Image (cartoon, rainbow, N blue to C red):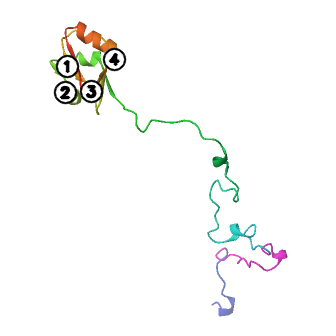
Amino acid sequence: MSLLSTLAPAPGATHYQKRIGRGRGSGLGQTSGKGGKGQTARSGGRIRRGFEGGQTPLIRRLPKFGFSNTAFETIYSVVNLDNLEKLSGVVTPDSLKEAGLVHHLPVKILGRGKLTKALTVKAHKFSETAKKAIEAAGGKVEIIK
């Protein structure tokens, strides 16, 4: 039978309560465990990345240079002559899509491989070697705008 006066929590169930701001001897005096004073000790007192205390930041002090046109560049789906060898008749971007050779427009035909058939090829752009190879095989080249 236990007496009410002997009741205690299980060992390890309770923790030492920090008594902040109770003198230097406690280890949590002066700034109460919050580091320095001022903005960083306050709730929400975060200093943004790159902030230099009001001084003009380094990113603004350095000169700017260069130019990138990647947002406006035209990206072509490339098809080579060896892929056109598998097709017949009139080859258009739509027929290339159906054959699974391209996934987006515009289409550019390049000159890798050999062409033995006379094909009429309609595309947005051709390399010089591809043009010569298609015409040498007896085919036609038509540029789509």
Q: Which residue is situated farthest in the left direction here? A: 89
Quarter occupied by the N terminus? bottom right
- Check if residue 123 falls in the magenta segment: no
Q: Which residue is mark 4?
A: 127
SS assignment at label 2: helix
Q: Which mark is residue 101?
A: 3
CA–CA distance in space, label 1 to label 4 = 19 Å
Tag 2 or tag 1, which sits nearer the N-term? 1
Q: At 16% across and 20% down in the image, what residue appears?
A: 90
Q: Which mark is residue 87?
A: 1
Which label lies toward us, 3 or 2? 2
**CB contact under 8 Å: marks 4 and 3:** no
Q: Which residue is mark 2?
A: 95
CA–CA distance in space, label 3 to label 2 = 9 Å
SS assignment at label 4: loop
**Seen in the image, is 92 located left or right of residue 11?**
left
**CB contact under 8 Å: marks 1 and 2:** yes
